[in-house]
Amino acid sequence: MKIDLFEFLKNGLSKLDFDGKLELTQNKEQYTLTIEMTFVMEKRARALFLEMTGETSPKPAITFVDAILLYDRYHFDPAKVQDEYLTCLPFEGTKGWEVAKAEALLTYLQILLDNSQSDLIDFLNSSDSSELTLFELEWSDEEFSRILAQKQQAQDRPLWLPYSE
């Protein structure tokens, strides 16, 4: 049985070291896959947090969610939704994605999760309440491309993970 892009990513995500929640969903009507990352951390030094609605949060823990969108470049235009995602990455229709690209995504995602979890802990433990600060994940196209180039060099020829509708 040949493994498809969804199964490859699902298996890879389950092996990542992350205290939060990683969820992979597929929207077959829109030809997309979404990787949702949920961080849950206990508040410490900061006494006041604002929700995205502008309301203060009385909860002892905060939940931070962000997502990566993978989309079929032939069937989906991410222009209307790209601001809602950390990044939007295209795949090649039913041909899917190169194995190297999927491996690079999982490798970079582990780095991103580690760095972001550390940054979130620092943010929550900061006692500087003199100014309003914002926490957000940061995607690096350069770092992802560097990892992708390494993965591609390690393969003799491109191998593909098909996208199954």
Image (cartoon, helix red, strand yellow):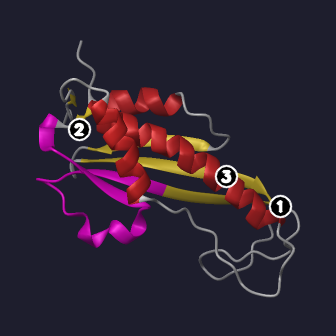
Amino acid residing under circle 3: Gln
Amino acid residing under circle 2: Trp
Determine whether the residue tagged by mark 1 lies in a helix, strand or loop: loop
Q: Nearer the viewer, mark 2 or mark 1?
A: 2
Q: Nearer the viewer, mark 3 or mark 1?
A: 3
Placement of the C terminus among the 4 image quadrants = top left
Q: Is residue 48 visible?
A: yes
Q: Position of residue 152 (x, y in %)?
A: 28, 35
Q: As drawn, is 133 to the left or to the right of 11?
A: right
Looking at the image, residue 108 lies above or below residue 17: below
Query: Residue at label 3?
Result: 117
Closer to the chain start, of discs 3 and 1, is 1
**Does the stretch in magenta take in 128?**
no
Query: Residue at label 1?
Result: 60
Q: As drawn, is 74 to the left or to the right of 84?
A: left
Determine whether the residue tagged by mark 3 lies in a helix, strand or loop: helix
Q: Residues within 10 Å of mark 1 (few under 14, many from 20)?
A: few
